[in-house]
Image (tube, rainbow, N blue to C red):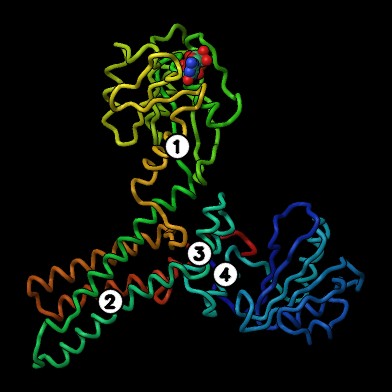
Amino acid sequence: MKNFNYDTEDLVVALATPWAESALAIIRTSGPGSIEATAKIFSDRDILVKSEHNKMNYGFIIDPTSSSKIDEVMVAVFRAPNGFTGQDSTEVYCHGSLPGIKKILDAFKQVGFRDASPGEFTFRAFASGKMDLTRAEAVQDIVSAKSTEAQSMALNRLSGGIETKINEIKGLILRTVSAIEIQLDYPEDEGGLAHVPINDVLLAEDMIKKLLATYSAGRVYKEGVKVVLAGKTNAGKSSLFNLFLREDRSIVSEVHGTTRDYLESWISLGGIPIKIFDTAGIREAVDSVEIEGIKRTQNIIENADIIIYLVDGSKGLSEDEVESFNMLKSRSNFIPLWSKIDLEGIVPPKDFFGISTVNHEGFSQLEDIIKDKVFKGNYIQGNDAVLDSERQKILLEKCLEELQLFRNGMESGIALDLVAQDIKEALDCLGEITGEITTTDILENMFSQFCVGK
Ligand SMILES: Nc1nc2c(ncn2[C@@H]2O[C@H](COP(=O)(O)OP(=O)(O)OP(=O)(O)O)[C@@H](O)[C@H]2O)c(=O)[nH]1
Ligand SMILES: [Mg+2]
C-alpha cells in the first residue's frame, strides 16, 4: 500500500467486523482525545468522558446534526497507555445492520474522525511500543489462520514466542560484541582472542537454524499440501480418494477409465490441510476426452507436493508403466502403494506399501508416511515458536550468514575491527526483525497486508 498513514496523532475510525449484515458489529476508534470525541455522539457524554479504562457503557449513538438516536449500543473505553493501541480508544458494539453501521461511521466523521487505513490500529500499537514487529505480524496471522493449528501458532507468536527467541539470540551476540569492544579498546590486555566468546556465536547460530527449520513446518499448517493419487486405470485410486474423504465422492467401478477428469477436495490430516486429487488412470487413451484427462493428470503430478502411486496388486506393475514408474520412483515425494492386499495371496513387493480400501489395512501407516514426507523430519513440538513471516525468515538467514562470516574471519585471523563489522550486521538483522531498526518500506509492506479495522 502506498501512502501509508504514519500520523498517529489524529482520530481514526473503522468497522472491525465484516461489512455484512450480522447480529452485532464492532466499530473501533483510536487517537488522543478519541474518548471525548466519541462522547460527542453518545447519549450520556459524562459517562464516557469519566469512564474508567476497560469499561463498557450502555447508551445510544446520536446523530450530531439532527440529535436523533441512531442505534442502541455498548461503548467500551480504553485509556492510554493501556488498551490495544496504547492510545485512548473506544469500541462501539452496535447492531449489525449495514445502514445503521454507515450512519454511525458518518456520525464519527462529523466529529473529527477519519477512516483508518488497513493495519493502522496495529501500527499505532507498534508505534506506541505496545508490541514489537513479530507480534504485530502475528496479529494479522491470527485473523487469517485457516486451521486450528495455524491459529495456535499465531497465538504463540502474538504472546511473544518469536520475540523471546530473538532476544535470547540477541543476548548471546551482544555478549560477543561487548567482548570485542573491550578487546578493541584495550588491545594490550592479556589473553587476546580467547576473551571473545565464540561459543556464544555457535549457540546463536544453532538457535537460528532451529528457528528457521520451523518455517517450512509452519507453512505446511498454513497453506496445506497437494497430494495426488496416480496410477493406471482400475488400480483403486478413486476408492482410496473416497476413503480419505470418508464419503463416496468419486465413482468407483471395475470398468477401466472410470475417472476421466480429476477431482479435488480438502481434507485434514492431523491438522494439516491437504488438497487431495483423484486423477484419470494412466493408459493408452481411447478417446479425446480421456486424452485430455490424462494430460491434466500429468500436470497435477508435476505440481504435487506428494505423489501417491497405486499399482493394482492383483495385476502387478504392468510393462507399459515401468518406465514412467521408474522416473517417479527417484523423487523424494513419491509413495508407491500396492493395492487390494485384502485379496488372497497378494503381498506387496519390497519398497511398496500395501493398502486395502476394503478392510483399511495399511491406511493409518499411509497417513504417517504422508506426514513424514510433508515435514521432512522438521516436526514442531507443542509449544515451539513457529516462524511464519518470510520477512523474518530472510533476515534470520542473513543474520546466520553474517555470524558465519564473523567466525570464519576470527578463525583465519583477520583483524578484529574488520570482523567486528560482520557481527554488528548480524545484530542489525535481529533489530530489523523486532522493529528496533525499521524503514518506511518495511512498515508499508507489512501493514498493507492487514485488513481494515486491525
Ligand atoms: N478387493 C479390493 N478391490 C478394490 C480395492 N480398491 C479398489 N478395488 C476395486 O477395484 C476396482 C477399481 O477401483 P477404482 O477405485 O474405481 O479404481 P481407479 O484407479 O479409480 O480406476 P480409474 O478411475 O478407471 O482410473 C473397483 O471394482 C473397486 O471396487 C481394494 O482395496 N480391494
Ligand atoms: Mg477412478
Q: Is residue 250 above or below residue 97?
A: above
Q: Position of residue 28 (x, y in %)?
A: 70, 69
Quarter of the view holding residue 421: bottom left
Please give the residue where the numbered disc 3 appears in the rendered image: 156
Q: Element at badge 2?
A: helix
- Name the kind of residue labelled 3 in the image: Asn
Task: Tally the marks.
Answer: 4
3 or 1: tag closer to the N-terminus:
3
Q: Is residue 427 above or below residue 46?
A: above
Checking the image for residue 219, the label placed there is none
Q: Nearer the viewer, residue 194 or 404?
A: 194
- Name the kind of residue labelled 4 in the image: Thr
4 or 2: tag closer to the N-terminus:
4
Q: Mark 1 CB in 8 Å range of ligand 1?
A: no
Verify CB contact (< 8 Å) between mark 3 and mark 2.
no
Please give the residue where the numbered disc 4 appears in the rendered image: 122
3 or 2: tag closer to the N-terminus:
3
1 or 2: tag closer to the N-terminus:
2
Verify CB contact (< 8 Å) between mark 4 and mark 3.
no
Give the mark toward the camera: 1 or 2: 1
Other residues around mark 4 within 10 Å, as few (<14) / some (14–19) / many (≥20):
many
Verify CB contact (< 8 Å) between mark 4 and mark 2.
no
Checking the image for residue 173, the label placed there is 2
Between the residue at mark 4 and the residue at mark 2, the CA separation in whole angstroms equals 29 Å
Give the mark toward the camera: 3 or 2: 3
Q: Position of residue 292 (x, y in %)?
A: 46, 17
4 or 3: tag closer to the N-terminus:
4
Q: Position of residue 338 (x, y in %)?
A: 38, 22
1 or 4: tag closer to the N-terminus:
4
